[in-house]
Amino acid sequence: MGQSSDDEPVALHRRVIAPRRGWRGPAGGRAAHVEAGSVYLGTTSEVAGLFPFLQASGLPAEGVPIGPDLFSGEMVCLDPAGWVGTLTSNPGVWIQGQPGVGKSAFAKRMCLGLVGYGYTMLCPGDVKGEYRDLVTALGGQVVRIGRGLDRINPLDSGPLGRMLTTLPASEQERLLAEVNARRSELVHALLATTHGLGRRPSATESTALTTAIRLAVQASPGVDPTIPDVVATLRTPPAELLDKLLASTSEEYIALTRELIAAMENLCDGPLAGLFDAPTSTPLDLAAPAVSVDLSALLTAGDTVVAAGLLATWAYSYSALDTARAFGLANRPVVLPLDELWRALRAGPGMVDAMDAITRLNRSKGEVSLMLTHSLGDLQALPTAEDRAKAVGLMERCDTTVLAAMPSSELARFSGQKPLTDRERQLVASWAAPTATGVDGTTQIHPGRGRYLIKIGHRVGIPAALELSDAERTLYDTDQAVRRQMKETTT
């Protein structure tokens, strides 16, 4: 290496490096004086305490690619199921952020990538129809629930019922009891909504309902009963049903079951008419790469109708998946995008328990559940303390957390459940609101859109930017309705 003055670059192994005092000229980093560094001696434990600028290692470059790390620029990937046993203990992913910052886009990227790795995507209740285009592009099946569209029979036995006749008699009896128990539980949950009893059935009503379902099944062997069939059984009770209720006269029987029969009638009439009162029109095709049960047609009917729809489609979808696995008809792992989580949890008492069971078993079943919500306040709005505790447990069991833009108040609430550092909270809060107004005519993009803090367990969070392809921008666009309305207003 040759000698040079302070203002001359030094050639080192054919590389040109900056002079010691910096380059001359604008933006050259020129310094008039460069101080010599100080040297300190100490033990390893002491020096570690004096040097707090620690940086965690990046995530393994495996799984679904998300985008560059906002600090280091390296590619960030996620593999929730593949990391179980090494980085995580559960494949659940909790995605939270304020509306419009890209939570659904993140979930759709995960679904797209996992389908490419051989997963089946199952969206059991697509409330806003956001996953319809993606499922169609993947060559999957979209089942649209609504009046004049597809119907789901809450008493449908699914793949399990269709395979019963192929089993030995003793096994048929055992599995039929399992099917009837699932049917009864779902109808109990539907009756707890405001379109039913508005509460769980009493002990006497529960006995009457369970018996009526079993008798309706026996009346038409090999054919799934419908809710009108159960109503007909309740209205004209056979002797076995009267004996179950210890009712010696018709008047006594009517007094015991009047509210139950009226609530069952409500499930077939009024806002729910034509939705769950006939045989299933389109069975789920679990051999397809992706399946979505689209409930967007129910939005105009109100939240209570959507809640009933979520209960029915969730139970039907997951029961179909569970029984298909039992018969070896669905061998691929599954990714479950659970968007609009707050709606699902408020659908009825059965939903919190159903989600709680799913998140406890998804590790053994190889399922990746993506739970999306706006705020932990949504969980605190549930009616009972038991439901609220179970709902918080859903988030706590997700070892992978993805935080999009949200205000400081929400970050403080989140940190009460899963601690965040001050720097992490400041970073995510900085994405929550734009710093410019765009009044100068320039196009402004919300600073939080497409930015996420990804935390794996208690590791330091990694900020990443989601980079979409042109095809994804079209498939994931959830602002089309807003832009269309604005265009119609201005014209």
Image (spheres, grey):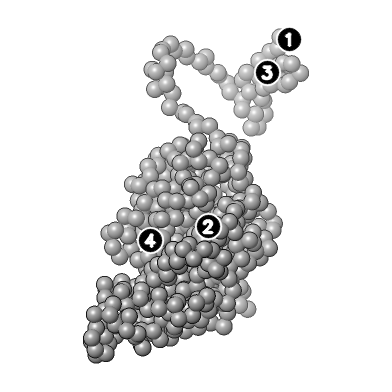
For label 3, the crowd category at 10 Å Cα-Cα, with few meaning under 14, some 14 to 19 and many 20 or more, is some
Q: Amino acid at mark 3?
A: Asp
Instruction: Give the numbered dot on residue 326.
Output: 2
For label 2, the SS is helix
Query: At x 52% / y 61%, what residue is drawn?
Result: 323
Query: At x 50% / y 36%, what residue is drawn?
Result: 86
Tags 4 and 3 touching, CB below 8 Å: no
For label 2, the crowd category at 10 Å Cα-Cα, with few meaning under 14, some 14 to 19 and many 20 or more, is few
Instruction: Give the numbered dot on residue 2.
Output: 1
For label 4, the crowd category at 10 Å Cα-Cα, with few meaning under 14, some 14 to 19 and many 20 or more, is many
On the question of residue 167 being in view, the answer is yes
For label 1, the SS is loop
- Up the image or down, 239 lies above or below 343; here it is below
Q: Quadrant of the N terminus?
A: top right
Q: How many marks?
A: 4
Q: Quadrant of the C terminus?
A: bottom right
Task: Give the CA separation, mark 4 to mark 1.
Answer: 73 Å
Which residue is denoted by mark 3 in the rendering?
A: 7
- Up the image or down, 309 lies above or below 342; here it is below
Q: Amino acid at mark 1?
A: Gly
Q: Earlier in the sequence, mark 2 or mark 4?
A: 2
Task: Give the CA separation, mark 4 to mark 3.
Answer: 70 Å
